[in-house]
Amino acid sequence: MRINQRFLRIAVTDMAMLKVRIRGSRRPNPPKFFYQNLPPEGIALLATIPDHKVSIPAAGSSWRGGRKFVKAQTTNSLKVSWEADAPGPIVVYQLQQDCNYAAVAVRVNGHNYSFEEFIEIARRRTLDCFGNLEKIPDRYVYIVPDKEEWGSILRDNGYVALNPENFSPPVLSSKTERYGHAIQIRAPLYSGDKLPERNPLPVFSRVEILQGAYVENPWVDFEEYLNVRTRLAVVPGTIAGGFSEWLAGLTKESGFDKWRFRPGMAFGERTEWWGPRGRRRTVHEGLDFVEGFRSGEISLIPEGVPVRAIASGEIAATLDDFMGKTVVVRHPSLTLSGGEVFHTLFSHVQTEGSPPIVNKGEILGRVGRRTGIHIRPHLHLTGAWFPAGFPFAEAGIDTIMHPGFTPAILADLNGLIEISPLCVMSPDDKEFLAGD
């Protein structure tokens, strides 16, 4: 759903908190509506929704604005019990066909407005009450986000809903996370030019990232940060060159003529290819090899198919994942100028133990899954740069595969399948993927 290029949604983490993302065939019907009550000055927040999908997170993060979501009844009723006591606008979110929630209406003082109508009303009221919004010189909110908070900022294209009541002086937090996640950010505060004291207002503001405390220009904008990460997220020639041979072997041993990639299976996808096709909690970190063509018919990858190394390397770790094991292969000859080493990760496999040193084409495990898992067996492949000597076993799979985990630079593998004659990019087929 896209409304004048302004899209307000419920954050994935909040959907999980509200228990509307229960997996499996017994998933209950989610409520049709959600409501969010903003403070009266939240009109300025709605007036500054950027041309990107963004969310106003629930209460619980001390540095961002927002109020806790209240779950409505699962009927078509739009009535909420606390409406009469709501001091500010109430944002109404409705369940969409993709199992996500988008803002469709706003209520203020008993009046109902469509979401797009109220955006224009909020802009006019903000201009009338506060004037033109301008950055306040040298005033920022500073934060060291954890990987979940940083993951939310990445999903919202660098924008955060700021609560000016939590303004902090320019002293960076000492809070860090283990294994090197200690990204430091700041977001400029805004005020209206009609406010003589230049008090900050709740707005959507885009963050800046600290690149180094001792350089001439230590802070870079979000776009520049992403551009640097994109330039580093390359697939080494050795891996790209060996991928075609590796894919041909996997295709033959699976009994396929070609692989079929549906929405949700490629790198960077935001939707699930299984179940109700909801939005992933995080963007997809790699490629999912799920199904292919066999004599013109679509078939699933057989369990027990060998999973082989794309290139020679060292077994850095074998980690538990939710379907099986993830084998992490370090390729010490492939390094960046900063010392990062390229790794290939093979997930959802059954292992029988691998030698510490593996050669190209050597078996690492076999496609399989634990019992009781309702997602079809498949092979997940990730390529990423990690710091040399990174402690994978201590960090765990949920940490190292999270897009908000800054020490890892995930490589975009889509180009490898897009040019391969053994891969077909195809529209979704919900009927075929619906069963277990």
Image (cartoon, helix red, strand yellow):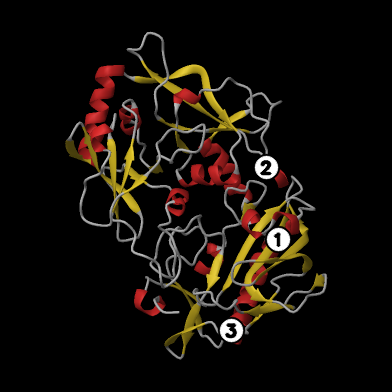
- 3D distance between C-alphas at marks 2 and 3: 38 Å
The spot of residue 235 in percent (x, y) is 63, 59
The spot of residue 54 in percent (x, y) is 40, 42
- The front one of 386 and 279 is 279
Q: Is residue 131 visible?
A: no
- The front one of 320 and 4 is 320
Query: Mark on residue 224?
Result: none
Left or right: residue 7 versus residue 422 is left
What is the three-letter code of the residue carrying label 1?
His
Q: What is the secondary structure assignment of the residue under circle 2?
A: loop
| Camera-nearest label, 1 or 2 | 2
Which corner quadrant of the image does residue 410 belong to?
bottom right
Q: Which residue is mark 2?
A: 177
Which corner quadrant of the image does residue 185 belong to?
top right
Query: Mark on residue 343?
Result: 1
Left or right: residue 213 versus residue 22 is right
What is the three-letter code of the residue carrying label 2?
Glu
- 3D distance between C-alphas at marks 1 and 3: 24 Å
- Residue drawn at (64%, 33%), measured in percent from left and top? 211
Of mark 2 and mark 3, the one earlier in the sequence is 2
Q: Which residue is mark 3?
A: 303
The spot of residue 344 in percent (x, y) is 68, 64
Left or right: residue 410 versus residue 258 is right
| Camera-nearest label, 2 or 3 | 2
Q: Is residue 286 visible?
A: yes
Q: Is residue 288 above or below residue 267?
A: below
Left or right: residue 132 versus residue 281 is left
Q: What is the secondary structure assignment of the residue under circle 3?
A: loop
Q: Is residue 84 above or below residue 128?
A: below
- Residue drawn at (71%, 73%), measured in percent from left and top? 309
